[in-house]
Image: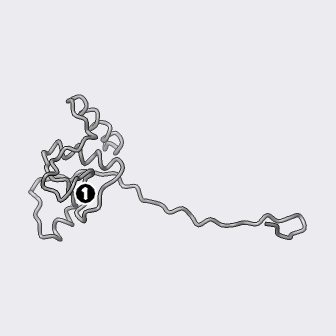
């Protein structure tokens, strides 16, 4: 049976806490970066958000990564990079953003059928 993303995240956080690690603290050394790094970054430089930040920090600590940059297999291939044989990806939570529906102004109608503002 496959575990859901919330169970996996909870298990990672509990495991890290049992080992004395605070998973919400950035685990890498930002000395190589042009400026301070506060969140994991996509290959295009955009920061991850939400629970994915904690998931990537935890994965970074587990695997001993020093850089905060993450990319998909396809992105690595497009850049001409290579992924080591046997490497596994870090599952993330995808929640599409929704734009609020445009507000519609409705006018109340009187019993005679005329509109009033």
Percent position (x, y) of residue 20? 21, 29
Which residue corresponds to the image point at 86% horizontal and 70% vertical from the top-left?
114
Which residue corresponds to the image point at 29% horizontal and 57% vertical from the top-left?
47
Vertical relation: 108 (above or below) 16: below
Q: Among all residues in the image, which is located at the extreme right?
A: 112
Percent position (x, y) of residue 69? 20, 57
Quadrant for residue 6, please give it: top left
Give the residue number, with chain letter if any, for mark 1. 41
Which residue corresponds to the image point at 82% horizontal and 69% vertical from the top-left?
115
**Image position of 41 (left or right of 94):** left
Which residue corresponds to the image point at 29% horizontal and 45% vertical from the top-left?
54
Under tag 1, what secondary structure? Answer: strand
| Crowding at mark 1 (Cα within 10 Å: few <14, some 14-19, many 20+) | some
**Image position of 23 (left or right of 104):** left
In this view, the residue in front, 80 or 33, is 33
In this view, the residue in front, 21 or 37, is 37
**How many numbered marks, from 0 up?**
1
**Image position of 1 (left or right of 105):** left
Percent position (x, y) of residue 82? 10, 63
Picture quarter with the N terminus: top left
**Image position of 115 (left or right of 29):** right
In this view, the residue in front, 42 or 37, is 37
Picture quarter with the C terminus: bottom right
Q: How has the structure been colored for display?
A: one colour
């Amino acid at each position: 049976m496959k575990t859901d993303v919330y169970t996996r995240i909870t298990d990672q956080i509990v495991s890290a806490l049992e080992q004395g690690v605070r998973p919400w603290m950035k685990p890498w050394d930002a000395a190589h970066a042009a400026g301070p790094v506060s969140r994991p970054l996509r290959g295009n430089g955009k920061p991850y958000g939400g629970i994915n930040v904690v998931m990537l920090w935890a994965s970074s600590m587990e695997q001993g990564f020093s850089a905060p940059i993450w990319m998909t297999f396809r992105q690595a291939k497009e850049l001409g990079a290579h992924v080591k044989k046997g490497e596994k990806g870090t599952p993330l939570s995808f929640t599409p953003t929704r734009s609020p529906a445009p507000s519609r102004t409705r006018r109340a109608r009187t019993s005679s059928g005329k509109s009033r503002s």
